[in-house]
Amino acid sequence: MEPASLAFRAHARRALADEELQRALARLRRNFQERRARAVAALPEFEELRRAGEAIRDQVLARLDHHLEVFVARARAAGTVVHVAETAADARRIVLDLLRSRGVRLVTKSKSMVAEEVGLAEAVEDAGIARVETDLGEYIIQLAHEPPSHLIGPAVHMTEARIARLFAEAHGGPPEREPERLVAQARRVLRRKYLDAGAGITGANFLVAETGSIITVTNEGNAELTQGLPPLHIVVTGIEKLVPTMEDAFTLLRLLARSATGQEFATYTTVITGPRRPGDRDGPEEMHLVLVDNGRTALLGSRLQPMLRCIRCSACMNHCPVYLAVGGHAYGWTYVGPMGAVLTPALAGLERTWPLPEASTFCGRCAEVCPVRIPLPDLMRVWREEAFARRLPPATQRHGLRLWAFLARRPALYRAAFAPAVRLLARLGGRRRRLRRLPLAGGWTAARDLPAPEGPTFLARVRRR
Ligand code: SF4
């Protein structure tokens, strides 16, 4: 999928006017935030765990090549065929070659953001191979022909009424509103597909170097059926998912579940080490792992390296006032919310994705809740600096910033320039002390009034005392 982030502002405007989306986002706000807050309150050592998670991820990134070497050797020893895809096109080619060479006609697929990133679903369909998404949320958006709007809840932008309509169209019968019945319908359809599929494609939450294992986490058990029933299992994941040891993986799993859904642990956490062995009762005959780089190594050693710590928990977007106002589709690509505002320009290019790093109020909540302590606002600031240097923001914004920087370095001049402006705005605010319109800065007042300054500036008041 090509990034459409350049249209962020237009998408956001549409999203704000979409009543059904706004209802869905209100529900999301309540659910995820409250559950995470309860889970964190119940674990006094949560902050300690966050620091441990950060250290594990940094340790991996500092020696990624070494951990990769160890992992690949162990995975191969366990019977997994490892492929390395430098680009998205390489990843698609490797997977399609595998499917075609085995004559696969139907693929089951569990949720994988990396597969989404490299455009695998479209490539499989374009090759004439049927694809069925097995994660319930992914199954819903497949029926709706829409991309995911959230890392762990791909269909969170939809209301139950819309899902009921979609299911009625796809499965026949009257629209069914009871969530349990909708789930039962999807299960009936999917069970048959698992048995008929020639291959199952999954992602991986972690890759464990010491054992050569992959770990998948779901709440529906669909990744297990996707990887275990068809004869061919293909894992598509990013090279940064490595952890040195199983113990490290479990530290991160404790953080992941609490930060994502407020659970102590996800319902299904599965460790897979190679395909079926002689004597095993089930499992795939072949297991292939596609390790995707697609721009990740370029981040190593850069100021944006901390972004590679991400464990895709979604806490940052669940607490982001911008994401919660406009939803995921406004971001125009696979990764959304604050993590998307940093990662998308890194993977797809800043020119093609500006103004995503501006999609933030810099309130800092994303960094406060991130389980691996990624300083997301600081990283967005790195992109803003870069965009300024490449002249991506409009000229008025650039010249305004230049003028502000000039004045901010000269306090006397700053005061002389701003004091009359502050007095004027205070007068314009009138008795209501609110400004309905601001000349040259209409964006501030387009959707709400701006509180007018109340009398003299803060510094003037301090001096007067
Ligand atoms: S940036 Fe942090 S909070 Fe956001 S998805 Fe990644 S790990 Fe979770």
Image (spheres, grey):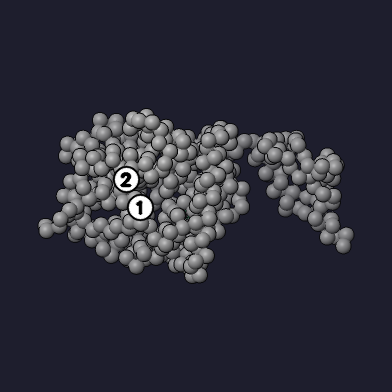
Question: Is any atom of residue 302 visible in this view?
Answer: no
Q: Is mark 1 within 8 Å of ligand 1?
A: no
Q: Nearer the viewer, residue 201 or 56?
A: 201
SS for callout 2: loop
Earlier in the chain: of badge 1 and badge 2, it is: 2
Whether residues under marks 1 and 2 lie with C-beta atoms below 8 angstroms apart, the answer is: yes
Residue 300: which numbered mark, if any?
none
Q: Residues within 10 Å of mark 1 (few under 14, many from 20)?
A: some
Residue 334 horizontal side relative to residue 413, left or right: left
Is 58 drawn above or below residue 158 in the view shown? below
Amino acid type, mark 1 = Thr
Q: Nearer the viewer, residue 304 or 454?
A: 454
Amino acid type, mark 2 = Ser
Residue at the location (25% across, 33% down)?
A: 129
Residue 218: which numbered mark, if any?
1
Q: Residues within 10 Å of mark 2 (few under 14, many from 20)?
A: many
Is 52 drawn above or below residue 180 in the view shown? below
- From the top left corner, tell me how far across and down residue 11 is, in percent: 54, 34
Residue 446 horizontal side relative to residue 122, left or right: right
Residue 256, image quadrant? bottom left
Is 23 drawn above or below residue 238 in the view shown? above
Q: Is mark 2 within 8 Å of ligand 1?
A: no
Q: Quadrant of the N terminus?
A: top left
**Rounded to the nearest whole Å, what is the CA distance between mark 1 and mark 2?**
9 Å
Residue 213, image quadrant? bottom left
Residue 110: which numbered mark, if any?
2
Residue at the location (11% across, 58% down)?
A: 279
- From the top left corner, tell me how far across and down residue 228 is, in percent: 22, 50
Q: Nearer the viewer, residue 116 or 238?
A: 116
Residue 352 horizontal side relative to residue 192, left or right: right
Residue at the location (35% across, 54% down)?
A: 217
